Amino acid sequence: MIIDGHAYAYRAFHAIRSLRSPTGQPTNAIYGFVKMLEKMRMGIQPTHLLVAWDGGLSAERVAALPEYKAQRPEMPEDLRPQLDEIRNYLAASGLADFCGDGIEADDYIACLARRAAAAGWEVVIASSDKDFMQLVSAQVGLLNPNDKTGTIWGREQVCAKAGVEPEQVAEWLALMGDAVDNIPGVPGVGPKTAAELLKQFGSVEALFTRLAEVKSEKIQAALRGAVAVVEKNLGLVRLQDVPCEFVPEKMKPQLVDNEKLCGLFRRWGFKGMLAELAGPLPGQQAELI
């Protein structure tokens, strides 16, 4: 299981409010992250696990589109210090994580998932980011926190959500754009129209070769004027290959460091979690305190 760290930290931060340590430090994101991680591990029972963090924006994407993700607000001040504390929790819990300078978590997760799948492993990616739908295959599934059923998304769920096959998701995104990442799409082409076009033509290349067959003159004209935009978008939305190694041993959960974990829970004021340390965490052996 590979977890999108920042996505879950933000989710926890906004889901829980006004939680602070005995010294007044914000702990809402830490608490929520820990609880979500425990629930995922109980549900999935992964043998190996890694949390990936954003290490900055891709230089290639910013060079291609200077306004890439530029509209995103600054990280909340109360969240920033909690990220380091979450990483301290992961280390004390014997769980692997990764953050590389200039490497977006999405790209690292994609790279790791592809390498693991190629080595014959089954992979679950935990994230609500629609970009990951392009990775779905017989060996790679998605755990979307917005889906309260806990279903591991496969081809069927991707097709139901996007209206296209996983192999077409990047082209689907390139046509309609992605407001979350500040990537402009073809004017007048939303998710439904993009899916219909790909169903009819199969690919962006075939679509532009056979533009005259597009029934709507308005959409046809918009597409004709957006050839370069879509081509650029494909380079932006496709998850890139980045330096990464698939070494299963590095992602196998290690023994919990009870002393460190106990100290963290005390510092954060997590009395319930402190009490639970008397029992083992999911999938690991923990000494009694």
Image (cartoon, grey):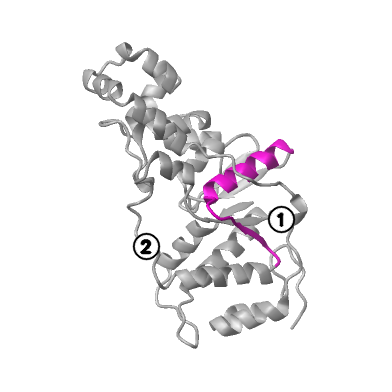
25 horizontally vs 117: left or right? left
118 magenta-colored: yes
Which of the marked residues, 2 or 1, is nearer the chain's N terminus?
A: 2
Residue extending furthest toward the left: 218
The quarter in which the C terminus is drawn is: bottom right
Q: Amino acid at mark 2?
A: Glu
Q: Which residues are magenta?
A: 94-119
Task: Give whichever of 138, 54 is nearer the camera.
Answer: 54
Q: Disc 2 designates what residue?
A: 74
Q: Secondary structure at mark 1?
A: helix
Name the residue located 38 percent from the left edge and 49 percent from the top edge.
69
Is there any visible trace of residue 278 in the rendered image? no
Is there any visible trace of residue 138 in the rendered image? yes
98 horizontally vs 146: left or right? right
Label ID, residue 219: none
CA distance for labels 2 and 1: 31 Å
**Residue 283 appears in which quarter of the rendering?**
bottom right
Task: Give whichever of 213, 38 is nearer the camera.
Answer: 213
Q: Disc 1 designates what residue?
A: 251
Q: Secondary structure at mark 2?
A: loop
Name the residue located 75 percent from the left edge and 64 percent from the top edge.
254
**Residue 161 appears in which quarter of the rendering?**
top left
283 magenta-colored: no
Q: Position of residue 241 (x, y in %)?
A: 59, 40
